[in-house]
Image: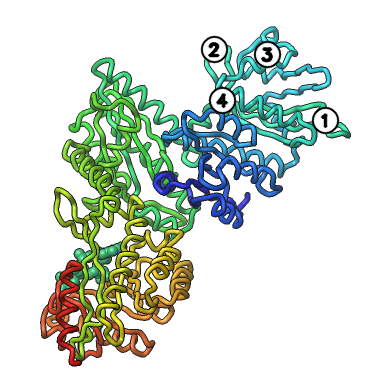
Amino acid sequence: MSGKNRLLVVDDELMNRDMLSRRLERAGYAVDVAADAREALERLEDDQIELILLDSMMPGMSGVDLLRLLRGTYTQAELPIIMVTALSDSTRVVEALNLGANDYITKPIDFSVALARIQSQIARKRAEDSVRDSEQRYALAARGSTDGLWDWDLTTNRLFLSERWKQMLALADSDMGPDPAGWMARIHPADRPAFQNELDALRRPGGPAQFSGEYRLLHASGAYRWMLTRGFVLRDQEGNAVRMSGSQTDITTSRAFDSLTGLPNRVFFTDRLENAIARAAGGAAPYAVLFLDMDRFKVVNDSLGHQAGDRLLVELANRLLQAMESAAPALPSGAAYVIARLGGDEFAILVEGAGDAAVMRPLAERIEGAVREPFTLENRELFASISIGIALGAPEYSNAAEVLRDADTAMYRAKSLGRSRWAIFDSEMRAMAVARMEMESDLRHAIGRDELRLYYQPKVELGNNRVVGFEALLRWQHPTRGLIPPLQFIPLAEETGLIVPIGAWVIREACIMLRRWQKEFPFVPPLEMSVNLSVRQFWQNNLVGQVADALAETGLDPECLQLEVTESVFVQEPVAAASVLAELKGLGVGLKLDDFGTGYSSLSYLSQLPCDSLKIDKSFVNQMCTDISCSEIIRTVVQLANSLGKQVIAEGIETEAQAELLKSLGCGFGQGYLFSKPMAAEKATAYLKAIFDALPG
Ligand code: C2E
Ligand code: MG
Ligand code: MG
């Protein structure tokens, strides 16, 4: 198989990019993002991209232009591309399809539709690749027994359909003559334009030699069946298509099932859930959805490998089936259930005919119990657990997405209670979800409405208590809720991607303030400023650009700016992190490791990291006077850092005793309430002025 396994989301709007990539990641895909055509081309260079979701409207080179460009290249001519267009923009859709887009989805994006289209494009491409890789004619002949065969003589326009082909649709010989129009007429209207496009492309002189596609055909019963058709084109010497032949496979059921576990998939599940909702609206037909997510699955996957991860998912699927089977007798009579794999390590169970908490509680407990039994994988025992969120059918629900969303919310609640737990969605959770949404929408406007504030906490040289600089600490002056500390909104900003514009604002604001202070209070050496970076901020595309812009705009000496990052940045991708740090270093700014001692804190990291100072976390400082091991750790860290030429600063110093002890351990700098709490800009200015005015001369 090819090594391609990533999706590329190209969209100029950060929110769209983020929303899509987060959801795709949760559905188990690896996702790259690009904000414009140029970035997209860069991402495509590493040859990992299996499919592109391409926004048709982008400033500069539009998505349609990029599509045209890619289709004109040799290497990307067949890369699956799904266009993302505005609902109203049908001419653009047609244009894109004509240019060779494989499919399209409309904004606002219905995620389950997007997912289904992505899956089907990837499946199609893989099937196509494998047909190409194998001996094609042989493969067709060998499959002849289960597949239908067809052969179309383009010179006479007569179509031959095998017996099996007709059987698949329960058609009699008389139902289908040799006229290809009969075939066309049975194709689902929604699939017809794409099919026709494909045919036109094939018939074009010099067109492709093989093809494969999925589409629906009308069965004699009146239902549509999903078919996969694969074939090849014979051409004469001028390159004109003279004959096409191929096979047809009924994939209706496989489209509804997850290929790994064999369970129904999201498409099928959503369908059933929609039905359940509709029935519930028509009368008393209770239902409930259990949303299951494996705890720490990523750890298994990362440490034991994807194959082991896959096997664990299969085993888990079996456990769920067994657990439900043994629980079924306890369900109200007439109740039925469906277990599905939604993607990644997410599963869901729909129970129909029962919808109250009293039934769901023991069910959830039984499932969790079944999963807690050890799994055996490659002769080793492995313990797993799942968290379950339950949404009980309610009249408010009008579609599957709403029910799944609430079950998902409850699942997160269960996880936050500790793993291997379950929770039922309730009105309190709804209130919290609403509050969160409100906070999110408020936060979106915080920059524009000028509600963000920086507070400044002095950094002091411990030997002489001289102020050498400040750390900028963010606050949100909320119109109704007052001053909100960073820990109450930065996690949300991280999750939503808002941290990127907010972070850019912080960097710029801090540089402007520092430059002003440097001019007004020309201390020697000049004052410095520390700015915190969070994880998501660190991994955005344009961090280096943001910092460079802020420096250029303010004319600040780069050495006076320090960026604080935490260890979590390095743990996941140490190599990539080091390269971003090196780029930042290239700008001349200082780098500081924040909260040292709270995370993984491998001392061996220290010598490798291109950071020039580290900050001992306040939890150590807090305990150092009572806990001898804390002060010993600090002593070791200080010695090691000094020998590596790195500066050490201790944060959270609240007492004289702590300051004295730190000084005696060799720690050069400190920050904390002992010296000053973080101050608003005016107060910090007054604070500096008092110091400056007191200087001799
Ligand atoms: P941090 O970078 O470790 O910042 C130190 C925190 O300790 C600050 O909390 C500060 O007010 C507090 N602190 C300072 N001295 C003392 C002391 O003597 N005793 C005690 N108990 N606490 C002290 P704050 O301002 O609430 O910030 C919390 C965290 O939020 C920061 O931790 C930082 O990780 C994050 N943060 C703050 N501003 C920003 C920002 O602009 N961007 C990003 N990405 N994160 C920020
Ligand atoms: Mg900090
Ligand atoms: Mg800190």
Q: Are marks 3 and 1 in contact (CB under 8 Å)?
A: no
The residue type indicated by label 3 comes to Gly
Disc 4 vs disc 1: Cβ atoms closer than 8 Å?
Answer: no
Q: Is residue 402 above or below residue 58?
A: above
Q: Which residue is mark 4?
A: 226
Q: Quadrant of ligand 3?
A: bottom left
Please tell me which of labels 4 and 1 falls first in the chain: 4
Q: CA distance from mark 2 to mark 4?
A: 14 Å
Q: State the residue position of label 3.
A: 182
The quarter of the picture where residue 126 lies is top right
Q: Residue at x 18, y 67 (%)?
A: 680
Q: Nearer the viewer, residue 305 or 504?
A: 504
| Amino acid type indicated by mark 1 | Asn
Residue identifier under label 1: 240
The residue under the point 49% across, 34% down is: 105
- Mark 2, Cα crowd under 10 Å, few <14 / some 14-19 / many 20+, is few
